[in-house]
Image (tube, rainbow, N blue to C red):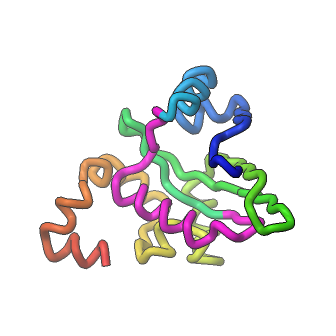
């Protein structure tokens, strides 16, 4: 934590399903800092903002969409636990991520819109809509969105 270097990464078999790669490949890419982010540019920005805003919470549960490089999309729920030392510095972070159905996503967002990276940033599409729109969203860059009025409104 003092150096911001990972000391240990543990993955289970479901990580292969979530990221579409073997566990060995995921670990190797993490070790070499070459892991691909499973997001469109806009989804990655949403995820980053969400993580920054909640970085000092000890427990967090949120829902998001993942888009793999091959274009497959899935809805995920991440439960995170952060353990802090006596000085308030993060010592350990544990994430448990699992795939959820569109209905599970919709139910969670309906009960708490702030629990979704999309709904919390103004994107209220249903789980089914997010999955259906994934291929198109994956090819939209933030620069292209900023170049047109509707894209700029979405970014705002």
Q: Verify whether residue 51 appears in magenta.
A: yes
Foreground: 113 or 4?
A: 4
Foreground: 90 or 39?
A: 90
Farthest left residue? 148
Q: Is residue 113 left or right of residue 11?
A: left
Q: Is residue 86 left or right of residue 76?
A: right
Residue 89 location, quadrant: bottom right
Q: Is residue 7 left or right of residue 146?
A: right
- Image quarter in which the C terminus is found: bottom left
- What residue lies at 35% left-to-right and 60% top-to-bottom? 42
For the record, the magenta segment spans: 34-61
The image shows residue 140 at horizontal and vertical percentages of 24, 54
Foreground: 43 or 77?
A: 43
- What residue lies at 80% left-to-right and 67% top-to-bottom? 87
Foreground: 107 or 69?
A: 69
- What residue lies at 63% left-to-right and 70% top-to-bottom? 54
The image shows residue 45 at horizontal and vertical percentages of 41, 61
Farthest right residue? 86
Residue 114, above or below 49: below
Residue 49, above or below 131: below
- What residue lies at 46% left-to-right and 44% top-to-bottom? 38
Please give the count of numbered marks on the rendered protein: 0
Q: Verify whether residue 136 appears in magenta.
A: no
The image shows residue 9 at horizontal and vertical percentages of 70, 35
Residue 22 location, quadrant: top right
The image shows residue 86 at horizontal and vertical percentages of 86, 66
């Amino acid at each position: 934590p003092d150096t911001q270097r990972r000391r240990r990464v543990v993955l289970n078999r479901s990580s292969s399903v979530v990221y579409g790669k073997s566990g060995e490949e995921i670990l190797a890419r993490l070790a070499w800092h070459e892991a691909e982010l499973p997001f469109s540019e806009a989804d990655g920005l949403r995820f980053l903002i969400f993580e920054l805003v909640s970085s000092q919470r000890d427990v967090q549960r949120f829902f998001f969409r993942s888009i793999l490089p091959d274009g497959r999309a899935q809805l995920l729920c991440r439960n995170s636990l952060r353990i802090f030392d006596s000085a308030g510095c993060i010592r350990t972070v544990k994430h448990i991520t699992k795939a959820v159905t569109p209905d599970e996503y919709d139910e969670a967002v309906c009960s708490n819109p702030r629990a979704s990276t999309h709904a919390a940033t103004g994107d209220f599409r249903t789980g089914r809509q997010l999955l259906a729109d994934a291929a198109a969203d994956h090819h939209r860059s933030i620069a292209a969105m900023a170049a047109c009025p509707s894209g700029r409104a979405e970014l705002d």
